[in-house]
Image: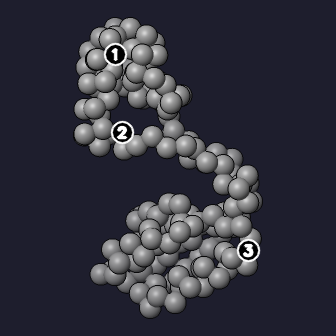
């Protein structure tokens, strides 16, 4: 097995079970626990694997209102605006994008009143020139991850 293939297979195994033990990963990939441990350490140090976190269903916790904010921002203020959005508790994703808008942010809220209050607060920023907000009716897929391609030997 090549180094790249082992890393990709290790990542794919963790994507399907992030709580797998080193021993079970070694058994599944037919390598030693030490090899798994060394490769995981390298992937972590390189920033490929940034952590092991639960996948949370925010709907089941009462955050069943999802809003998509599109913002036009004064050019030089883009880093400041995106950093402020990143620090907002309920903003789960913030993207700098090409196209008609400069920023897209995704927020999770318990109700439309809370959403409205937070969005109004965000829009008080003088560097935001224009906004468009959409409320998600149905999340078809969310936070999906995908297996890496693995060349079979």
Question: Which residue has dot 1 on it?
Answer: 33
Query: In the rendered view of the protein, which quadrant contains the N terminus?
Result: top left
Q: Quadrant of residue 21?
A: top left
Indicate which disc, 3 or 1, sits on the residue closer to the N terminus.
Answer: 1
Residue 51's label in the rendered image is none
Query: In the rendered view of the protein, which quadrant contains the C terminus?
Result: top left
Mark 1: secondary structure: helix
Contact between marks 2 and 1 (CB within 8 A): the answer is no
Q: Mark 3, residues whose alpha carbon is within 10 Å: few (<14), some, or many (≥20)?
A: some
Indicate which disc, 3 or 2, sits on the residue closer to the N terminus.
Answer: 2
- The residue that appears at 44% across and 68% down in the rendered structure is 86
The answer for how far apart the CA atoms under marks 2 and 1 are is 18 Å
Mark 3: secondary structure: helix
- The residue that appears at 53% across and 69% down in the rendered structure is 89
Question: Which residue has dot 3 on it?
Answer: 112
152 is higher (above) or lower (below) than 50: above
- The residue that appears at 26% across and 24% down in the rendered structure is 38
**Front one among 10 and 140:** 10
């Amino acid at each position: 097995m090549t180094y790249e293939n082992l890393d990709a297979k290790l990542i794919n195994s963790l994507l399907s079970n992030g709580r797998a033990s080193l021993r079970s990963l070694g058994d599944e990939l037919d390598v030693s626990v030490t090899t798994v441990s060394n490769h995981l350490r390298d992937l972590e140090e390189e920033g490929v694997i940034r952590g092991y976190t639960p996948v949370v269903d925010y709907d089941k916790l009462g955050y069943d209102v999802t809003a998509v904010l599109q913002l036009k921002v004064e050019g030089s203020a883009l880093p400041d605006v995106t950093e402020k959005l990143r620090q907002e508790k309920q903003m789960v994703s913030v993207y700098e994008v090409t196209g008609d808008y400069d920023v897209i942010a995704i927020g999770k809220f318990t109700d439309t009143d809370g959403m409205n209050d937070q969005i109004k607060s965000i829009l008080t920023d003088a560097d935001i020139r224009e906004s468009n907000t959409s409320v998600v009716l149905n999340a078809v897929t969310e936070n999906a991850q995908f297996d890496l391609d693995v060349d079979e030997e």
